[in-house]
Amino acid sequence: QVRLVESGGGLVQPGGSLRLSCAVSGSNFTYYNMDWYRQAPGKQRDLVATILHNNSTNYADSVKGRFTISRDNAKTNTVYLQMNSLKPGGTAVYYCHTEGLEAVDNYTNKYLELWGQGTLITVSS
């Protein structure tokens, strides 16, 4: 079964840095896009950053210049979110998300949309 496994959350001081990772477990999966979303307490879930299969990236305006999404070249289905200059009040649950195709057999691909379990980032002094 294909699923997303996140790691790297925790407590960080304002102005600090943290790196999240997201890996696709299970083989025969090719993603179109891998994304990071975040959901602050009482707020909606918002898109933070996207990386496409061709390595192009997009960011929410609120994180441009501070966050970087990247892919592990040795592990093509693993992406990272480097977060710098984290802001006070930036506490949120970060979710990894992907859409892509799972090769079921030599002739059949199945579309999958997956979410990670979420990892809590607490920004506090």
Image (tube, helix red, strand yellow):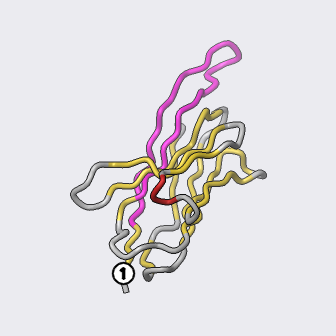
Q: Which residue is mark 1?
A: 124
Residue 117 forms part of the magenta stretch: yes
Left or right of residue 43: residue 51: right
Residue 112 forms part of the magenta stretch: yes
Q: Residue 104 at what x, y percent from top left?
A: 61, 22
Find the magenta span and give its range.
94-120
Q: Residue 119 at what x, y percent from top left?
A: 42, 61
Left or right of residue 43: residue 118: right
- Extreme-right residue of the structure: 74
Dominant secondary structure of the magenta stretch? strand
Residue 29 picture quarter: top right
- Extreme-top residue of the structure: 107
Q: Residue at x 66, y 32 (%)?
A: 28
Q: Residue 30 at what x, y percent from top left?
A: 65, 33
- Extreme-left residue of the structure: 42
Q: Residue at x 58, y 46 (%)?
A: 58
| Vertical order, 29 against 46 (above or below) | above
Q: Residue at x 39, y 65 (%)?
A: 120
Residue 69 picture quarter: bottom right
| Vertical order, 52 against 66 (above or below) | above
Q: Residue 75 at what x, y percent from top left?
A: 72, 50
* Number of other residues with Cα within 10 Å of mark 1, as a class: few under 14, some 14 to 19, many 20 or more: some
Q: Secondary structure at mark 1?
A: loop
Counting the numbered discs, the total is: 1
Q: Residue at x 54, y 67 (%)?
A: 83
Locate the C terminus by quadrant: bottom left
Amino acid marked by disc 1: Ser
